[in-house]
């Protein structure tokens, strides 16, 4: 499968790992949009949020727990942070392996562009 994030999971492409276990990987975004910009991905290949099924409920919840832990470790939990997942073209999704963006360290705008 020609998936960039699967290649990162397999260590065929390097990334700055923030956290890793048997179910998820978190790494620094290559083009950070905030002082903290970490991507949390499942090791299971799921191409978009639309492909998430009830089988993945535990995994998706766990991705949020990992993101929360990273936010606390980076001392941005109390200030605030944004967790988001883009889905398909108009949202701006460019990598078709689901990823939770953890953005923090600056004031976030709303509505997002
Ligand atoms: P999307 O636009 O799909 O929601 O987010 C994809 C994200 O992956 C972007 O923020 C982009 O900067 C990041 N990204 C794309 N290619 C790479 C890469 O090779 N390494 C890392 N660490 N991040 C990447
Ligand atoms: Zn993948």
Image: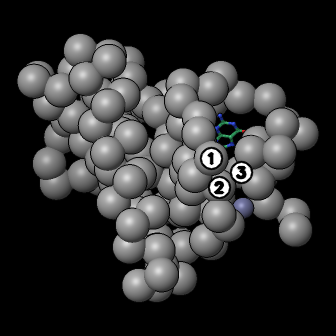
Along the line of sight, the residue nearer the viewer: 74 or 113: 74
Whole-percent x and y of residue 21?
Answer: 59, 39
- Tell which circle, 3 or 2, labels the residue nearer the N-terminal end: 3
Q: Which residue is mark 1?
A: 22
Whole-percent x and y of residue 42?
Answer: 57, 56
Q: Local crowd at mark 1 within 10 Å, few (<14), some, or many (≥20)?
A: few
State how far apart marks 3 and 1 are (Cα). 15 Å
Label 3 sits on a secondary structure element that is: helix
Q: Which residue is mark 2?
A: 43
Indicate whether 21 appears above or below 7: above
Q: Nearer the viewer, mark 3 or mark 2?
A: 2
Label 1 sits on a secondary structure element that is: loop
Indicate whether 41 appears above or below 34: below
- Tell which circle, 3 or 1, labels the residue nearer the N-terminal end: 3
Q: Is residue 92 left or right of residue 68?
A: right
Is the N terminus in the top left, top right, bottom left or bottom right quadrant?
A: bottom right
State yes or no: Cβ of the residue under disc 3 lies below 8 Å from any atom of ligand 2: yes
Q: Which residue is mark 3?
A: 5
State how far apart marks 3 and 2 are (Cα). 9 Å
Indicate whether 49 appears above or below 32: below
Q: Nearer the viewer, mark 3 or mark 1?
A: 1
Q: Is residue 63 in sight in this rendering?
A: yes
Q: Residue at x 18, y 26 (%)?
A: 77
Whole-percent x and y of residue 8?
Answer: 76, 42
- Tell which circle, 2 or 1, labels the residue nearer the N-terminal end: 1
Q: Is residue 26 left or right of residue 66?
A: right
Q: Residue at x 32, y 31 (%)?
A: 69
Answer with the quarter of the image where residue 82 lies: top left
């Amino acid at each position: 499968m020609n998936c960039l994030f699967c290649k990162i999971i397999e260590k065929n492409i390097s990334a700055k790992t923030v956290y890793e276990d048997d179910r998820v990987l978190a790494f620094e975004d290559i083009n950070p949009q905030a002082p903290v910009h970490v991507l949390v991905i499942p090791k299971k290949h799921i191409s978009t949020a639309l492909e998430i099924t009830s089988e993945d409920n535990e995994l998706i919840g766990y991705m949020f727990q990992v993101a929360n832990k990273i936010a606390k470790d980076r001392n941005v939990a109390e200030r605030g942070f944004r967790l988001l997942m883009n889905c398909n073209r108009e949202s701006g999704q460019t990598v078709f392996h689901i990823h939770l963006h953890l953005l923090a360290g600056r004031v976030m705008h709303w509505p997002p562009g």
